[in-house]
Image: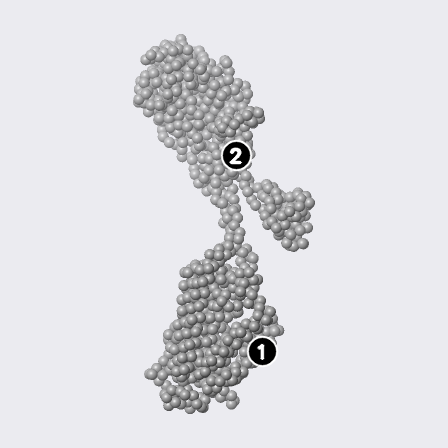
Amino acid sequence: MAVTGTKNRRKGKKRLTRKMQKNFRLILFGFVCLFLCLSIRMMYIRATKGTEYSNAVLSHQSYVNTTLPYARGTITDRNGVTLAVSKPIYNVILDPYGILSDKKFKKPTLEAISEAFHVEIPELEAILKENPKSRYYVLRKNQPYEYLEKYEELRKENHKVIKGVTFETEYVREYPYGSLASHVIGYTNKGNVGTYGIEQYYNNYLNGKDGREAGYYDSELNLIKTVWEPENGDTIVSTIDVFVQKIVEEKIRDFMAELGSENIGVVVMNPNNGEILAMASNGGFDLNDPRNMSAYYSEAEIAAMDDEAQLAALNKMWRNFCISDTYEPGSTFKTLTVAAGLEENLINTNSGFYCEGTRGIDKWEIHCNRKSGHEHLSLTESLMFSCNMAMMDISAKEGKRLFRYYQEHFGLGSKTGVDLPGEAAGILIREENLNEVELATSSFGQGFNVTMVQILSAYASLVNGGYYYQPHVVKEIVSRKGATVLDKRDSLLHCTVSQSTCDFIRKATYMTVKSGTATPAQVEGYMVGGKTGTAQKGRREERKYVVSFVGSAPSNNPEVCIYVVIDEVHSDTLYNSSRPATELASKILAQVLPYLGIYPEGDIDYGIDFDANLGDGDETNEGNVGGEGSLGEGQGGEGQTGEN
Amino acid sequence: MAGLTREDMDRSVSVKPKQFYDYTLLFLIIFLVSFGVVMISSISAYNATKYYDDSMLFVKNQIKYGVLGMIAMIAISCCDYHWVAIRFMRIRLVTWFYLACIVMQAVVLVIGHSSNGSSRWLEFGPIRFQPSELTKISVILLAAYVVQKVPKLLDHFMGFVIIMAIFAAPIGLVLAENLSTAIILVGIIFVICFVTSRKKLYYYASIIVLAVGGMVAIFKVSYRAARIDNWLHVETADGGYQILQGLYAIASGGWFGKGLGNSIQKLGYIPEVHTDMIFSCICEELGIFGAVCLLALYAILLWRIFLIGLHAPDLFGSLIVCGVFVQIAMQVLINVAVVTNSMPATGIPLPFVSYGGSSLIFTMMEIGMVLSVAKRIDYGK
């Protein structure tokens, strides 16, 4: 009989003896020890293999990770004509390892590739033979979409055995019009980095966001895929009109072939909202090949250049003359001097002036363009014949403070904020340096520097009723989904002059073209208004001239403003004449106006009663500032010191 | 020494002391099952969605099994465990139960051969279960019954051999289909004998003999050798995939885990991740800290069961509790040891936590037996 406890015996029941309890405890203790061992074992695994195994787990997560490129935004002209577009191209990628993984894949796959992409089968076999282990082999780059379609069609018929070809999409920037409006559009580097022009200024809008395709294989090699679609860039609707731009560039080319000059710039603008319809210079480059200088230099010349010279030449080619170069505006500025005088009521439309031909101020002698003098002139005539003496009278009345105020009021001396990179601010003479002589020469546009957009914007505000619009080349930005992201229609900055001043300027500029210094700017059937300019540049004794014409049409209610600036006409007879500029403007306007829906009219009575005999129309040799007089050196000094 | 007679039982009922119900144990079980449901909801969602298009499928099933198991557990806890000693047609119920299990094991072995790979399962209409789970219960009951009848027999080595011989049939049948369950059965009988025996030496000797014999058997038999090879060279062997992925999970979880629901390895990398391999993903999501806490919880559960065993009103009750104790302890031990690659791979679910109806319900029924024993404890003493 088992020796059990007395209590058990009394009850007649067996219970766990002390010995048995001890055994049971031993078992419990044993298991608890084993549990402890396992806990230590886990910690050991963590401590010794933690990093290695964690990495193994991480590697599960990113088996596939491809970037899906976005398409850079399109740039169109104001009518939706594409100026720049990113087109998808397809690269064909082979998976030799996959093709060779099963005997039955090879033949049909190679045949399909050969048929779709026009690759010879021996070439394919050579590739397979040389790269049997490769999983990524770029077979062809830049394949048209039709080839892909063909391949997919073939694969659909026989999808079980045609394997191992994938495609990658890339985008390339294309400029369908080549060099057209190259300075305005700009080009792209490395696909998505805009350089110059709209491409640079609106780079952030044009660029989208890359998409991503990521996935991992689960234990059965099923690809669990997640796709984040790329966000394509916004479409930019430019204010440029391809047709107007084309005409302008064509006329510039004609001019360069006929006469030629150092630089020439033409800007056409809608004065009623600041939209630039065309902006061109004699520079320009092929946007599809922006480093190609063959249009300007021979191969031998290019080969002779060192890196620095080449870079300088490229930068010169890429430089947008119309916004980056400054020059002395000359007589076109006179409209602003007169407008300021009228605004301040220092003169009125009936004011009379007397031109004696040459006037001595301080130690200098300043000449009018006609050295014999215009004698008695009305205010209108002072503009028509571009009289320097009248302007000097007006500026003298204004005084340096007002004069300087109006320069800034018209947007000179600071950037206009045109939406293009590389705009210059120009240089004005500081108010404290604006002494009698400087004030006098400044009144007819000598001694300070401006850019083309500054003068054109200021002039546009004079003839459009006094509204200064910020010049711009982009009309609106539209997202790929069609939402307007940016609207530039509201570009009015401030008012410059009153309606009455505007009316006077309209009439006076019309008369200037009709029978003043700018008669070559006339376009048959149109009322063209405008003002010429002939400015000496640099040192006066060099006798280098910048000739220009700023005009509007129709002059009674302008819808188009044009500004032509020619830097150093290559001609012995016309080097100091504004005729090339006025003629060029006339040729451009003659084609642009009908295109823009402004039609020629017959004889119209404009209600202006001017005596047509007032001037003798010496329009070819208008600019004669300084002339041979002793003023020359002095003026040159002023021009160079400028604002400093 | 007479066995338990009807009079004995009547008396034990009539002198019923203050009612004792082990709510602590009940709470521990509810906690473990709930914890299992939470972990399954995190870990099984991927596979459930992928294969059944219902991310909550396994969770719903497990809750269903949990409720069924709870009902069975409480029902059994209300019964008197002495009822198994009642004679029916001159044979005690415990013996009938034992014989039925042998038959079922045999049937499942035969059907299993014909229906390819599902040899662990038996179907009775809508009910599908693993008879081996039932066999464990019957072996615990019969071993406890036999041993408490003749405890002195165990003082001799031959006694131990006789007892083992009684259970040779079910062990053999289980061994044919599932090595690990057979090991657990041997373990249960061995510990019940060990606890009762007053002589220890031959047990230690037999452990050594068994271990050496086992080693030789394992290394000699080629298919087992492959398993050993997988165990020793888990990183390189072809068959080590499942365990290696489990180790990746344990190691990458770090000390405090990636957080509930953040496991990567559950995404189809670890086969059987919500059943036998659930512990690896618990490590990954809750960290070593969480895993050790879970082991501690099991230790508390075992300690609680141990206390009931110590204070059981009679030897039969003590030995039943001891059997349940060993079964749960061995399952936890083997499961965690396999997952941590501390022993060759074998498929044993983690009690109360792993997904699986048979395992959960039958283990809870065993706890019901323990609670039934606990209820008999004379609380007054």
Residue that badge 2 annotates: A83
Residue type, numbered disc 1: Val
The residue positioned 47% from the left and 22% from the top of the image is A564
> Residue A231: x percent and y percent?
49, 45
Residue that badge 1 annotates: B107
Extreme residue in the top direction: A372
Indicate left or right for B245 with B293 as reference. right
Vertical placement of residue A643 versus A190, above or below: above
> Residue A466: x percent and y percent?
37, 27
Vertical placement of residue A17 versus B253, above or below: below
* Disc 2 to disc 1: CB gap under 8 Å: no
Between residues A8 and A77, which one lies in front from this camera angle?
Answer: A8
Disc 2 and disc 1: Cα gap in Å? Answer: 83 Å
- Secondary-structure class at tag 2: strand
Residue type, numbered disc 2: Leu
Front of the two marks 2 and 1: 1
- Secondary-structure class at tag 1: helix
Dots 2 and 1 on the same chain: no
The residue positioned 47% from the left and 19% from the top of the image is A568
Res A406 → quadrant: top left
- Visible residue check, residue B227: yes
Q: Residues within 10 Å of mark 2 (few under 14, many from 20)?
A: many
Between residues A346 and B3, which one lies in front from this camera angle?
Answer: B3
Q: Residues within 10 Å of mark 1 (few under 14, many from 20)?
A: some
> Residue A199: x percent and y percent?
48, 35
Indicate left or right for A449 with A144 as reference. left
Between residues A19 and A61, which one lies in front from this camera angle?
Answer: A19
Looking at the rendered structure, which numbered label has been put on residue A548? Answer: none
> Residue B367: x percent and y percent?
43, 76
Between residues B368 and A548, which one lies in front from this camera angle?
Answer: B368
Q: The N terminus of chain A lies in which quarter of the figure?
A: bottom left
Chain for numbered disc 2: A
